[in-house]
Amino acid sequence: MAPKRSQRMQILLTLAKRSEDDAAKKLAQMQNQIQQADEQLTQIEDYNQAYKLEIQSKTTGLSGRDMMSDRSFLERLGSAVKEQQERLRQMREHLNNLRQAWQIKHHYSQSIKDLIERIQHAENAALEKKLQSQLDEMATQLYVRNGKGLAAGEHG
């Protein structure tokens, strides 16, 4: 006997769930990367602030060359902060895209699951109808057989 339609649809559900799981893993990985990048940004910002405070505390007695070096270093730190902020912005944008992809795959999996349930209900209803028809046929045959037996016995 060939597999039922609902059983054949399980293959689609398995593939859809696998795709959804892969999308969920990518989403989780990106969330972890964003958390790490956010921590790095905080570290850079904290270091930048601490360095500014350190420079302010030692302004007396610094040579012009030292002041230029400090300013250059602060500019590089500022650039690093901006680059990290831009990197985070891009990562968050990518995260949103991954989230949308996961939602689409999740919806697709759920739709297949719902379809399978509807198919199973239809298959069960059809099977119940077939069984009821068979029972009715058997009851009719039994009635006819018993009815004819009684009728023949009464006349004989």
Image (cartoon, rainbow, N blue to C red):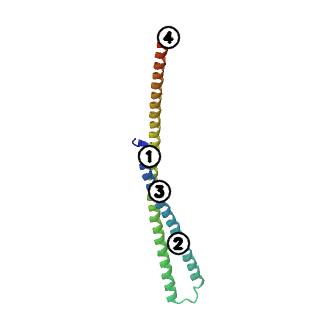
Residue at the far top: name it.
Answer: 155
> Looking at the image, which residue is at 46% across and 72% down?
83
Q: Dot 1 lies on which element?
A: helix
Q: Which residue is mark 3?
A: 21
Q: Which residue is mark 1?
A: 112
Residue 40 numbered tag? 2
The one nearer the camera, 105 or 76, is: 105
| 3 and 1 marks in contact (CB < 8 Å) | no
Residue at the far front: name it.
Answer: 156
Q: Amino acid at mark 3?
A: Asp
> How far is disc 3 from disc 1 in space, using C-alphas?
15 Å
Q: Dot 4 lies on which element?
A: helix
- Lower sequence index among marks 2 and 4: 2
Q: Amino acid at mark 4?
A: Glu
> How far is disc 4 from disc 1 in space, using C-alphas?
62 Å
For disc 2, the neighbor class at 10 Å (few under 14, some 14 to 19, many from 20) is some
Image location (x, y in percent) of residue 96: 46, 58
> How far is disc 2 from disc 3 in space, using C-alphas?
29 Å
Q: Dot 3 lies on which element?
A: helix
Image location (x, y in percent) of residue 90: 44, 65
